[in-house]
Image (cartoon, rainbow, N blue to C red):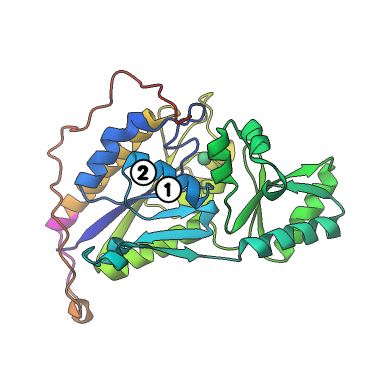
Amino acid sequence: MEQRLLLVFSDLDGSLLDPISYAWEPAAPMLRELQQENVPLILCTSKTRAEVDALRRKMGHRDPYIAENGALLVLPWRFLGKANLRGPYTKDYVLRLGWSYGEVLHTLAELARRAKVRVRGFHQMTAAEVSRSTGLTLAEARKAKQREASEPFRFVDASEAQIRTFRQMARGYGFKVAEGERFWHLMMGADKGQAMALVTYLAEIVEDVRVRTIAVGDSRIDLSMLQQADFPIVMPRSDGAVDAQLLRLLPDAVRASAAGPEAWAEAVHSAVLGHYRNAAQAVRKPRPVAAGDSWRVAAPREAVPAPSGEVRWKSPTSRKTASLR
Ligand SMILES: [Mg+2]
């Protein structure tokens, strides 16, 4: 029988988190269901580790996550197939998939100097300034400033041509410059898709099974992640519109019915059901075992029963408006 493991990768802001209130609570039943079904949910965000850790504590999230747009990968020990029995080994592995923050800041300043443009990065802003620009609380803004491998920044009085020069120059050196909702981002390492590929590959090695992936995102910075997913899901923005470029480049992606955690949960639920249906069909058509396949006995994952057709998880009827702020 062909074993398959399902991994769900999701962006946070504008995907799992409500684009306006930052609320995730309406998705709580779906998060619990994923845990019960042993489906890891890998958060994949531009946020810092400090921000994600605070959120994970509230969510009860224990799976791996990708921070700073792919530059940081955090793997709990148990994801690597190790029993969590000894204190020192309960720690997470933190992998920086790129250059250090100091190197990023140095490069940002140097690129700006060569492109003859002024930039203002997070490290030059106070927490109050970040808070005003983002709508985060002061405490959250402090966490957003605890960066390790990437820098959000703004151009100061720059012309279109200057910005183009800056971007071309950065690309020429092999660095990524992405335009986000409020800030530009200089990234000098893995992007979301590359970090996702690494997690997927690690899961296949550790579990010795084929891995299928669901990915959820709402913006171009999620494209690298969505493009390699077996089930890509695109979230609309708060006005209901979906990023046109995402739609064009991902013609087969599922479009969630609305923005916000409730629609996120509905879309992920449908994709999970789709995976189980495919897995049930695969059981009927067993893959021939190749000679080299049995070199290692995989730790059996708990069997995931294929749903009998009816939807077990129901969308909550009353939408909570609780905010993280
Ligand atoms: Mg987003």
Could one spot residue 247 in this view of the protein? no
Q: What's the amino acid at mark 2? A: Arg
Q: In the rendering, at what x and y percent does residue 124 appear? A: 72, 47
Magenta highlight on residue 287: yes
Left/right placement of residue 19 relative to residue 168 reads left
Task: Locate the N terminus and report the quarter of the image it occupies.
Answer: bottom left
Q: Secondary structure at mark 1?
A: helix
Task: Give the residues in magenta.
Answer: 282-288
Q: In the rendering, at what x and y percent does residue 3 appear? A: 19, 61
Compared with 12, 68 (above or below) is below
What is the distance, in whole Å, between disc 1 and disc 2 at their CAs? 6 Å
Look at 54% across and 45% down and name the residue there. 143
Q: Mark 1–mark 2 contact, CB under 8 Å?
A: yes
Crowding around mark 1 (Cα neighbors within 10 Å: few <14, some 14 to 19, many 20+) is: some
Left/right placement of residue 23 relative to residue 36 reads right
The residue lying furthest to the top in this view is 318
Q: Secondary structure at mark 2?
A: helix
**Which residue is labeled 1 in the image?**
53
Q: In the rendering, at what x and y percent does residue 224 appear? A: 52, 53
**Which residue is labeled 2 in the image?**
57
Crowding around mark 2 (Cα neighbors within 10 Å: few <14, some 14 to 19, many 20+) is: few
